[in-house]
Amino acid sequence: MKNYTLPLSTYSDLKKMSCEDMAKWAADLFAKGVKAGKASVTSEEAFVASLDAVLKSTFDIGDTRAEAIIKRPGEILNGGKEETTK
């Protein structure tokens, strides 16, 4: 995982943001991170497997919670609706 340093100008802007604006900024940052992460792996299965491994090893999260977290980026990127395939 690449380390990210927040630029001072962004930090200053964040301090002045309302809760709604900060939530939008954080959701956008998260979506960009998911998109970059997906681009860095060869398949979605590999992405899910690596995310699952990080959640369980780094954050000590159990299977049920890890599965719920892994579903969330899809919901965010699809406008709040979970993608379904038939």
Image (cartoon, rainbow, N blue to C red):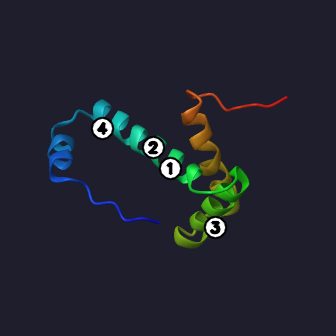
Within 10 Å of disc 3 (Cα), the crowding (few <14, some 14-19, many 20+) is some
Looking at marks 1 and 3 on the same chain, the residue that comes earlier in the sequence is marked by: 1
Whether the residues at callouts 4 and 2 have beta carbons within 8 Å, the answer is no
Secondary element under disc 4, as helix, strand or loop, is: helix
Q: In this image, 26 relative to 78: left or right?
A: left
Looking at marks 4 and 3 on the same chain, the residue that comes earlier in the sequence is marked by: 4
In front: label 1 or label 3: 1
**What residue is at 70 percent from the left and 53 percent from the top?**
43
In front: label 1 or label 4: 1
Which numbered disc covers residue 22? 4
Observer-nearest residue: 71 or 8? 8
Q: Residue tagged by mark 1? A: 36
Q: Which residue is at the far right?
A: 86
Estimate the x, y position of residue 11 in percent, counting from the top left: 19, 49
Looking at marks 4 and 2 on the same chain, the residue that comes earlier in the sequence is marked by: 4
Secondary element under disc 2, as helix, strand or loop, is: helix
> What separation in Å lies between label 4 and label 2 (alpha carbons)?
15 Å
Q: Residue tagged by mark 3? A: 53
Secondary element under disc 3, as helix, strand or loop, is: helix
Estimate the x, y position of residue 70 in percent, counting from the top left: 63, 50
